[in-house]
Amino acid sequence: MQTYLYTFIILVGLMLHGQQNDPIYIVEGDTLTNPYVDLGEVIVLPNLKFKSYKQYLTYYRLRKRTLKVYPYAKIASERLVVLSKRLAAIKRKRAKKRYTKRVERYLEDEFKAELKRLTRSEGRILVKLIHRETGQTAHGLIKDLRSGWRAFLYQSTAKFFDIDLKTTYNPTDKEEDALIEGILLRAFADGSLEPPEKKN
């Protein structure tokens, strides 16, 4: 009798231990505790095909320039988010201007030497990527953060170097911008560039 009792207790214990608290989903004969599996986003890009060696060289020059200047555009976007939050906390207009000037001086000290070494082509790509990352043109950012006069002055100086600060980034309509977008997506996929953080 005791043997039956022990056997019964062991069987009940095993049955209780094997109980599943989570709901079970049956998919094509397989039992799952989750109805779906989280997977990372996969971007499928077409293979690159070039009609000529010249086209190949043009693409790889564009790729080299894009990969060189993208980190600056990303930093600009990140700093703009921080700057906007801090400016929102400042109440007085004069204090906002003072703070913006201080940030501008700090950024000039940090990046002026590196940005001076950029070529004109790299500068043009950087202006496009700033628009891609921030959603505003470089001219619009300067006008909003400093003044219309300062934006005019910077635009005039940039025009001297054949760069337009009002340039927008439009990968659906502009061929060069579509190539730049493809370069960035490939670089994010292979890990050579860190993608921007998704904004909520």
Image: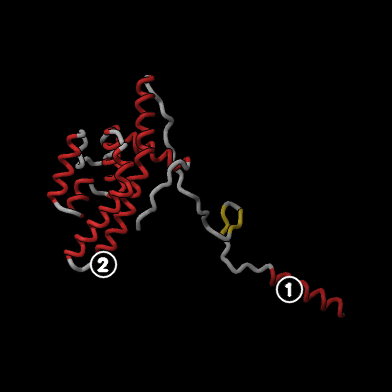
Furthest residue toward left: 149
Distance CA(mark 2)–CA(mark 1): 61 Å
Q: Looking at the image, what colour scheme do you see?
A: secondary structure
The correct choice, above or below, for 53 with respect to 46 in the image is: above
Q: Which amino acid does label 2 sit on?
A: Ala
Mark 2 element type: helix
Furthest residue toward bottom: 1
Q: Where is residue 138 in the image (x, y as percent from the top left)?
A: 23, 46
Identified at 31% across, 57% down, the residue is: 81
Q: Residue 59: which quarter of the image?
A: top left
Q: Is residue 154 left or right of residue 43?
A: left
Give the position of the C terminus as an image quadrant.
Answer: bottom left
**How many numbered marks are there?**
2
Q: Name the residue under label 1.
A: 13
Give the position of the N terminus as an image quadrant.
Answer: bottom right
Mark 1 element type: helix
Q: Which of 104 and 11 is in front in this view?
A: 104
Q: Pointer 2: residues within 10 angstroms few (<14), some, or many (20+)?
A: few
Marked residue nearer the N-terminal end (2 or 1): 1
Q: What residue type is labelled 1?
A: Gly
Q: Where is residue 64 in the image (x, y as percent from the top left)?
A: 38, 33
Identified at 17% across, 42% down, the residue is: 155
Q: Nearer the viewer, residue 171 or 67?
A: 67
The correct choice, above or below, for 23 with respect to 74 in the image is: below
Q: Name the residue under label 2.
A: 89
Q: Position of residue 2 (x, y in %)?
A: 86, 80
